[in-house]
């Protein structure tokens, strides 16, 4: 097996507890989760590493990118995989208006990512998405909830540290909502209360005083304490 990146080789050896010359394609098929950290790497090298991982780990279910410039070639290769969970932290996209993920992706996390326009990006999310996690987007991006109404399968929505425009919350299956560090008004609280299956919500403590939040707390579980912020579907740490 021809691998060119020494860091990836070391990662494979650590994960499989084998020397590189003993690792077979069958061994790599057992890897379900991989992390790619491209901090300090030029975009062309980061692209090569990411594509290399996806080509040799054919049965990956989850891929976590950190400090990676997501090129068109990376997105294209992602579309050929069976990966279901994608996480991006401190990433930027080469062609954010035309990022289209494979239909089978059901979990996307974006933490502190650099996008000029989240509207186009969110419009292209796969309809099978069950979890959308956006935290502290760069450049004070505005997230319009109306863009998400096509995601009929969405069960968990996390918009922490975001500027949210609550223009529509027609999310029939969503039962988990987190808005920690996100501004909530009386009007947005009213719209949140229309979510038919909402069971648990995390908000910053200062919004507990809103009358609409007090009323909503009689129907659903509202939390403020980060020690209770246990999200069962967080990506696995390597």
Image (cartoon, rainbow, N blue to C red):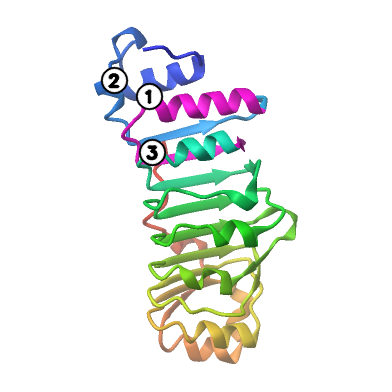
On the image, the x and y values in percent for residue 26 come to 24, 22
Q: Which residue is mark 2?
A: 25
On the image, the x and y values in percent for residue 150 come to 47, 70
**Residue farthest toward the left in the current orientation of the protein:** 26
Assess disc 2: are there few (<14), some (14-19) or many (≥20) residues with their C-alpha within 10 Å of its C-alpha: few
On the image, the x and y values in percent for residue 182 come to 63, 69
Residue located 63% across and 30% down the image: 39
Secondary structure of residue under mark 2? helix
Assess disc 3: are there few (<14), some (14-19) or many (≥20) residues with their C-alpha within 10 Å of its C-alpha: some
Is residue 12 or residue 217 the one in the foreground?
A: 12
Above or below, comparing residue 64 to residue 100 in the picture: above
- Which corner quadrant of the image does residue 71 belong to? top right
Secondary structure of residue under mark 3? loop
* Foreground: disc 3 or disc 2: 3
Is residue 160 or residue 73 the one in the foreground?
A: 73
Q: Which residue is mark 3?
A: 81
- Magenta range is 43-71
The image quadrant where one finds the C terminus is top left
Q: Which residue is mark 1?
A: 56
Distance Cα–Cα, label 1 vs label 2: 7 Å
């Amino acid at each position: 097996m021809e691998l060119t990146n020494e860091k990836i080789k070391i990662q494979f050896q650590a994960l499989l507890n084998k020397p590189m010359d003993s690792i077979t394609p069958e061994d790599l098929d057992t890897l379900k989760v991989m992390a790619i950290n491209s901090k300090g790497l030029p975009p062309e090298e980061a692209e090569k590493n990411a594509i290399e991982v996806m080509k040799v780990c054919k049965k990956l279910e989850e891929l976590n990118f950190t400090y990676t410039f997501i090129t068109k070639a990376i997105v294209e290769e992602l579309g050929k995989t069976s990966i279901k969970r994608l996480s991006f932290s401190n990433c930027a996209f080469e062609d954010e208006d035309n990022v289209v993920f494979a239909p089978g992706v059901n979990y996307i996390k974006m933490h502190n990512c650099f996008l000029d326009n989240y509207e186009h990006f969110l419009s292209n999310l796969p309809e099978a998405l069950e979890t959308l996690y956006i935290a502290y987007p760069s450049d004070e991006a505005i997230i319009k909830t109306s863009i998400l109404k096509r995601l009929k399968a969405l069960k968990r929505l996390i918009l922490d540290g975001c500027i949210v425009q609550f223009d529509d919350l027609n999310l029939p299956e969503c039962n988990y909502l987190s808005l920690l560090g996100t501004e909530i008004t009386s009007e947005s609280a009213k719209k949140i209360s229309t979510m038919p299956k909402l069971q648990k919500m995390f908000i910053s403590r200062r919004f507990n005083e809103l009358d609409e939040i007090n009323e909503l707390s009689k129907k659903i579980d509202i939390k403020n304490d980060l020690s209770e912020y246990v999200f069962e579907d967080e990506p696995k740490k390597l």
